[in-house]
Amino acid sequence: MELTDIMPKEKWVELQEELHTRFQLNADVMDKEGKRLAGNTWGNDLCKAIREDKKGFGAICAPAGMMFTQMMKEGEPFVEECDGGMARISVPVKVDGELIGAVGGCGLVVDDGEVDAFTVGMMSDLEEAAVEKMAENVGIASDEKVKEIQEFIQKRINEAL
């Protein structure tokens, strides 16, 4: 079973856009293999800059993506940080116990967390001062906000099922 068996791709893209607009996430919908159903939405300039930086992508985004895909395949909701200090929030999509994908996004800093400008600078070709400036616009997600995001996603998944 695939995501598009329960809802047309256009509806998944609408949900992705809604998550981006409502929560300022780099929102995405992933199939069961961890591939995006549609392109990127950018919740902040820092994530976009890291992703567009060849060294930053290879050192931060790619390993985080592999880790998040493995966590997604476990079929449980999760919140986990990348090496840059920003969190991925994910909720699985299951039909009769079968994992068919996940909905969520990244690019927020959770309570008690922070963008690690030094690490981002070392792991990319971005200047630490530029990272610090872009980090000023990275959203903060309290524990309550994270729960709200996960509950919102779960509600929308349940409506699709």
Image (cartoon, rainbow, N blue to C red):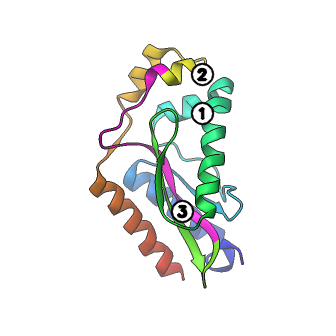
Q: Which residue is mark 3?
A: 103
Alpha carbon separation for disc pair 1 and 3: 21 Å
Q: Residue 76 location, x and y as percent?
A: 52, 66
Q: Residue at x 48, y 64 (%)?
A: 77
Q: Which residue is mark 2?
A: 124
Q: Residue at x 51, y 42 (%)?
A: 42
Q: Residue 51 location, x and y as percent?
A: 61, 33
Dividing the image into 4 quarters, which one contains the N terminus?
bottom right
Dividing the image into 4 quarters, which one contains the C terminus?
bottom right
Dot placed on the residue nearer the N-terminal end, 1 or 3: 1
Vertical arrangement, residue 11 with respect to residue 141, above or below:
below
Packing grade of label 2 (10 A; few <14, some 14-19, many >=20) is: many
Q: Disc 2 marks which amino acid? A: Ser
Question: Nearest the camera: 23 or 66?
Answer: 66
CB-based contact (under 8 Å), mark 1 and mark 2: yes
Q: Tell me which segment is drawn in magenta.
A: 100-118
